[in-house]
Amino acid sequence: MTTASEGKRFRLPILQGILPIDRAGVGRDIIAGFTLAALSIPGTMGYTKIIGTPVITGLYTILIPMCLFAIFGSSRHLSVNADSATAAVVAAGLAGMAVRGSNEWLALCSLLALMAAVLMFAARVLRLGFLADFLSRTVLTGFLTGVGIQVSLLEVSGLLGLPRISNHPLSQIVHDAQSIGQTNPYALSMALAVLVVILGGKKLSEKIPGGLIAVLGAIAVSWALGLDAHLATLGAVPSGLPTLGLPQVDWSWPLIWKLAPIAAACFVVILSQSAATSRAYAAKYNDRFDENVDMVGLGMANLGAGLSGTFIVNGSPTNTAMVAGGGGRSQISQITTSVIVLLVLLFLTGPLAHLPDAVLSAIVFLVAVKMIDVKGMSRIFVEARPEFWVALVTAATVVVVGVEQGIVLAMILSLLDHVRRSYRGTNSVIAVDKRKKGWQTVALSTPQQIAPGLMVYLFSHSLYYANAGQFVEEVLELVKSSGQPPLRCLCVEAAAIGDVDFSAAAMLRDTATLLREQDIRLVFANLTTNVRAQFDRHGITEILGEHAIYGSIHAVVAKYEDQSGAAEATPTTNNDGAAPAC
């Protein structure tokens, strides 16, 4: 029978990003929602150029998905919307599977959103929120930089009014260079004007909606001067609400399996980017959030996207920053934005027909350039040179090979980087600090005995097959360079050893036997209860002999000094023929 507390625990949590409502801050949240709408409406329309869907689908990502996350997510700050990273992953993954911009292409985009939702729900059931930690900041910086370079190169053709002939950035930029003489002056002038308005407004004040001003101005100029005859525009944009239903695709397992790698890549990007953004703003404003609950919110948002005929949505760092900068402190801001978009869809889609394509290209180009984190890459280069090359390889893979391959490589490099830095611990020797009358750590290259004939080796990692060789090498080198008097006892400070696998256990037995043959006793201090049980199970305790495991280094030193004093008074050895016990 389920108790009341258990029933409450298993009940689906909702409205965590809204409740409790700060009445004094509601007005501020609503104003921030207006700010987000002003800045994100042109931005989401621009993302449709990246992914290759009708411009109206960009507004659809704000309407239902944003509301669903506000209801089911836990973060009070995360803004879920269209995102350039996932848009680029989808566009690259679907290349060749359908005609870009066709109904079939849009249906596949919506199906991917549903698949991403299923992965989110499955991850929530399995409590896989920790997976977000397996994309290091280094490779994530490289990945987003690569996406920024890729998208910005692809948008150069739009700025110049040239046709898009390839989804590969290098091929497209070469074509643009060869066709530079065919540049459309109207498109280029419009794009430059948009860049000036957005950058100029941003320089004057972060709160000036430069993107919205540029879009409205471009629509007015295009309509007044009849520019539709001289450059490409959006054309008729349907008004009204999206039609809810399953995507019109040929439902089959082969299709699902074909789309699975793309959905998985998007899942990783959504999970890592959303969690990182939520975590950053929760820490900034001292709020709580639950990654697992957020996965439900993100799953519901993508479910809404798939059923409303739009594409994958993601936690947007840019939009989240817009809301925070506008004073928003809860999901009321996002709900306000959704209401504004609802009004636009019902009454204001007509003027969008006159919006030049070059305007959206300019907006996307700016967004992409912001993703190129030169400052972050430079900082990695200065502070961690090996990690810089990892980030650079990730970025290059995204640009040269593809976004999907780049995110897979990012995951692999993150894990390899973790293993590289963690499996070989930085170990040392604990020695006497004569000035402070205590102990200190010294480098293995200059070992010191903590007492005549006794040395303490600090091993700073769990013992397993990958670093067992390091343990043996360093122990034997310490024995060789121990100095005078000859080493009689080597103590391993084992507080950091959290686990010993089968290979490491065999190594410890062999090492203890080898040292015993040299009349050196191997003992351990500060073993955890779990590791002590492993020692017993693997037969290490038996090989070490009695009284070889101590609760502290102090106990080892005290016992060793007592035994050494007794040995000097009455020279003898233990029954097993080893040196005096520690």
Image (cartoon, rainbow, N blue to C red):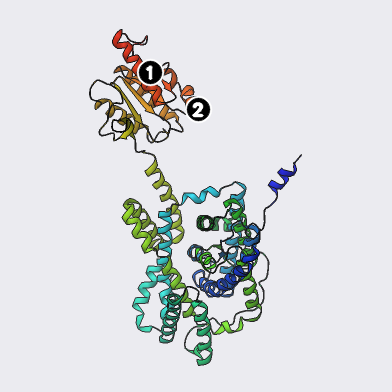
Amino acid type, residue under disc 1 in the picture:
Lys
The answer to whether residue 249 is visible is: no
Q: Quadrant of the C terminus?
A: top left
* Left or right for 168, reference 326: left
Q: Quadrant of the N terminus?
A: top right
Q: CB under 8 Å between callouts 1 and 2?
A: no
Q: Position of residue 25 (x, y in %)?
A: 61, 66
**Residue 385 in the image: above or below residue 92:** above
525, 10: nearer the viewer: 525
- Tell which residue pokes out farthest to the bottom in this image: 225
Instruction: Name the residue located 23 percent from the left edge and 25 percent from the top edge.
Output: 483
Q: Position of residue 362 (x, y in %)?
A: 45, 76
Mark 2: secondary structure:
helix
Q: Which residue is mark 2?
A: 529
Which numbered dot is residue 559? 1
- Tell which residue pokes out farthest to the front in this image: 436
Instruction: Name the residue located 54 percent from the left edge and 71 percent from the top edge.
Output: 44
Amino acid type, residue under disc 2 in the picture:
Thr
Q: Residues within 10 Å of mark 2 (few under 14, many from 20)?
A: few
The answer to whether residue 176 is visible is: yes
Q: Position of residue 554 (x, y in %)?
A: 39, 24
Q: Nearer the viewer, mark 1 or mark 2?
A: 1
| Alpha carbon separation for disc pair 1 and 2 | 21 Å
Query: Does label 1 or label 2 sit earlier along the sequence?
Result: 2
Q: Position of residue 7 (x, y in %)?
A: 73, 45
Instruction: Name the residue located 24 percent from the left edge and 20 percent from the top edge.
Output: 485
Q: Residues within 10 Å of mark 1 (few under 14, many from 20)?
A: some
Instruction: Name the residue located 39 percent from the left edge and 39 percent from the top edge.
Output: 423
Which numbered dot is residue 215? none
Q: Quadrant of residue 353?
A: bottom right
